Image (tube, coloured by chain):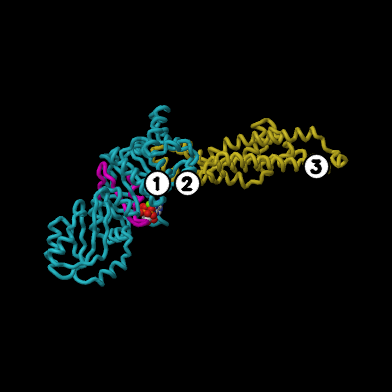
Amino acid sequence: MTQWLVNVDWLEIGRACWDTLVMVGVSLFFAVLLGLPLGIALFLTGKRQLLEQPIVYAVLSFVVNLLRSVPFVILLIVMIPVTVVLVGTSLGVPGAIPPLVVGGAPLFARLVETALREVDRGIVEATQAMGATVPQIVFGALLPEALPGILAGVTVTSITLVSYAAMSGVIGGGGLGDLAIRFGYQRFQTDVMVITVALLVVLVQLLQMLGDRLVLRFSRR
Amino acid sequence: MIEFDGVRKTYRVRGQETLALEVERLTIERGEVFGIVGHSGAGKSTLLRLINLLERPSQGRVVVEGEDVTRLAPAQLRAFRRRIGMIFQHFNLLSSKTVAENVAFPLRIAGTESKAAIAARVEELLALVGLSEHAGKYPAQLSGGQKQRVGIARALACRPSILLSDEATSALDPQTTRSVLQLLSDINRRLGLTIVLVTHEMDAVRRVCDRVAVMDGGRVVETGPVSEVFLHPRHPTTREFVLESEHVDTSEFLENLRKAAGRVVRLTFKGEATYRPLLGEVVRRFGVDFSILAGRIDHIKNVPYGQLTLSLVGGDVEEALQALAGAGVDVEVLR
Ligand SMILES: Nc1ncnc2c1ncn2[C@@H]1O[C@H](COP(=O)(O)OP(=O)(O)OP(=O)(O)O)[C@@H](O)[C@H]1O
Ligand SMILES: [Mg+2]
């Protein structure tokens, strides 16, 4: 067994783990920051909604679909010039974050839109009948009612970001994916590959568990 | 006072304008409980939602307390809506907020009162609807009747002068329905609130309404005081509703009428006449025999009434009917 794990440098693994967590954490933060308002805008301008705006909706929806249809690997490469401008490098942990945000935000926006649509129209109507403004309806009623759905969306997004972050190893992004590619794939160190994949599996399981707990915690139905 | 003046509401369905509602004239007086009944799709909800402009009329005016609501600017409309409470069939409470937070919500939206004032008002409202011990619960932890009471407390939070109720008791069992209707009736009396009550149950109308409009196919087909509409329905839809509410099988009833001998009359006793032994006196005096085809003794709001459908044979039927009419009994000759 120890023979088999001969290539594994645990310090390196630990650092890679930390890098992955940072990449996922930071990009999740920005994906939520950008995706939430985008999702709210998608919802509000949608058909038969409070601020129905067919043209605005069509444009937003097109952009979101476009970003979501580009394979992430391609996005990584296409984004390089933008990334360099934004964070000064396209390599390592910082270089991975902009493409991760651009990959995660549209996904999260769609999940927010769906969660808001799940809220009973009657709730919006009752709030409107109280004389509420649109921001009051959104922040006072819609978001609190959709919170469990939005948290589930955060969970899905974070898990997607874990796999995207691993993919960013392809262009030297750092983290567990980078390790798997450099050692596991390029140097045929199968044990490193297995360990990194196992760690990713554990990370995804933990995120899902945490997410489910949070959703349950905020569900009052 | 709420007035509808030449109101039409059309919807565009698959590119085609379809008429959902057409009300030439309808007036709801201040302080009354006004019922709106009709079958599904008759346009009841549409009519109700025109009052607080959840639905905008395609044509015509809706005038509430002297104000044409269709001309209100957005900010004015929001202020206006605060003066109108609304309750719903499925309660529409916020599941993420506690009972107290739900009731406080319209006050927080209005933003005119301090935190302490809101808390005091919430306490007062929960006491009014009998839910003081449930303040910290979430709606999911309440029964249907309790949820509707929260809905009522929430609707009353901003001290509205009008309460709109869309099938508020339709999801409740008969006993709970009665207690919620009783609560609405009390509120109407104590607060002098105008209540507009949409329902498909004649029974609810009979219990709490002063006047009623019967709707069919987007139009108001009959309107008047509940006792009038109830005891002397004119439009076929109204008749159907009244018979339904009395659990009379229409075809069976007509079959009975066909088989009955002699004169068939419907006698309506109202108020005090309900308790006097009038019928016995009269039939003895004029030597008339009768058999009962249908009968009912009940209350409309708080007024007792009795209604009997009789077939009369022998003796002096005409004189007997005149004597009954003279004693304040409403006589309708059916055949
Ligand atoms: N948004 C809409 N789009 C198209 N048609 C509509 C819309 N809302 C209502 N209608 C139509 O208007 C008519 C009246 O509907 P309304 O909801 O007022 O009926 P109702 O009497 O309240 O019925 P129910 O007892 O089922 O609630 C119906 O024929 C309905 O199909
Ligand atoms: Mg309806």
Please name the residue that numbered disc 2 is placed on. Answer: A120
Q: Give the range drawn in magenta.
A: B25-51
Say which of marks 2 and 1 sits in front.
Answer: 1
* Pointer 3 local density, CA inside 10 Å: few below 14, some 14–19, many at least 20: many
> In the image, is residue A163 above or below residue B252?
above
Chain shown yellow: that is: A
Is residue B50 rendered magenta in the image? yes
Q: Tell me the shade of chain B.
A: cyan
The reply, left or right, for residue B86 in relation to residue A14 is left
Circle 3 sits in a helix, a strand or a loop, which is it? helix
Circle 2 sits in a helix, a strand or a loop, which is it? loop
The mark that comes first in sequence, 2 or 3, is: 2
Image quadrant in which the C terminus of chain B is located: bottom left
* Pointer 2 local density, CA inside 10 Å: few below 14, some 14–19, many at least 20: some
- Toward the viewer: B148 or B9? B148
Count the marks. Answer: 3
> In the image, is residue A108 above or below residue B316?
above
Please name the residue that numbered disc 3 is placed on. Answer: A184
Say which of marks 1 and 3 sits in front.
Answer: 1
- Toward the viewer: A47 or B297? B297
Q: How far from the left and from the top, in percent, is residue B53?
A: 35, 44
